Image (spheres, rainbow, N blue to C red):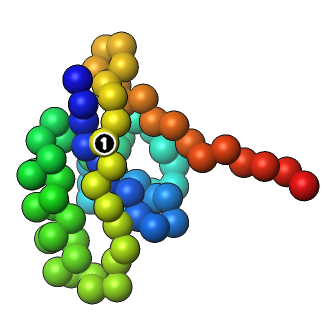
Amino acid sequence: MKTYVLQAQNNDMLDKELQWTSKIVAKYIFTTPHRDIALNQLVELNAKDASLRAEVVEYELGPVSYTHLTLPTIYSV
C-alpha cells in the first residue's frame, strides 16, 4: 500500500500537529492514503505561507502500517 506525506524543500516533513519537523519519526508524521487529501493540505498550507516550497511525496507502507521513510544519503568529505 502507498501513503502520501508532505515534504518541504529543506527535507522537513509535516507532522500530525501540522508543524514542519526535521525529526522524522514515522508515527508522528502526517500521512494519508489519498493523494487528493495530501494535495488539499498542501494548498491550505500554501494559502497561509505563500513562500512555502513543499511537495507531496509517495511512500510504501511497511510492517504494521508504518511508513518506510528513507533519508537522503549523507556524504562526508
At horizontal 21% and vertical 65% (from top left) the residue drawn is 42
Which residue is depicted at the point 14% across and 71% down? 44
Q: Residue furthest bottom?
A: 50
Q: Is residue 31 visible?
A: no
Viewer-proximal residue among 23 and 72: 72
**Residue at coordinates 36% horizontally, 13% vertically from top-left?**
63
Residue 54 versus residue 65 in the image, above or below: below
Vertical order, 55 against 76 (above or below): below
Q: How many marks?
A: 1
Q: Position of residue 46 (x, y in %)?
A: 22, 76
Residue identified by numbered label 1: 58
In this picture, residue 37 sits left or right of residue 16: left
Residue found at the very far right of the displayed protein: 77
- Regarding mark 1 in the picture, which secondary structure is present there? strand
Residue 42 visible in the displayed image: yes
Q: Quadrant of residue 40?
A: bottom left
Image location (x, y in percent) of residue 72 = 60, 46
x and y percentages locating residue 59 in the rendered image: 34, 36
Compared to residue 15, the image places residue 54 above or below, namely below
The image quadrant that residue 67 belongs to is: top left
Crowding near the residue tagged with mark 1, few <14, some 14–19, many ≥20 C-alpha atoms within 10 Å = some
Residue at the spot x=56%, y=42% of the render? 71
Q: Is residue 41 left or right of residue 67?
A: left
Quadrant of the image containing the N terminus: top left
Q: Which of these two is toward me, 17 or 1?
A: 1
**Looking at the rendering, in which quadrant would you find the C terminus?**
bottom right
Amino acid type at circle 1 is Glu
Of the pair 40 and 21, the residue shown nearer to us? 40
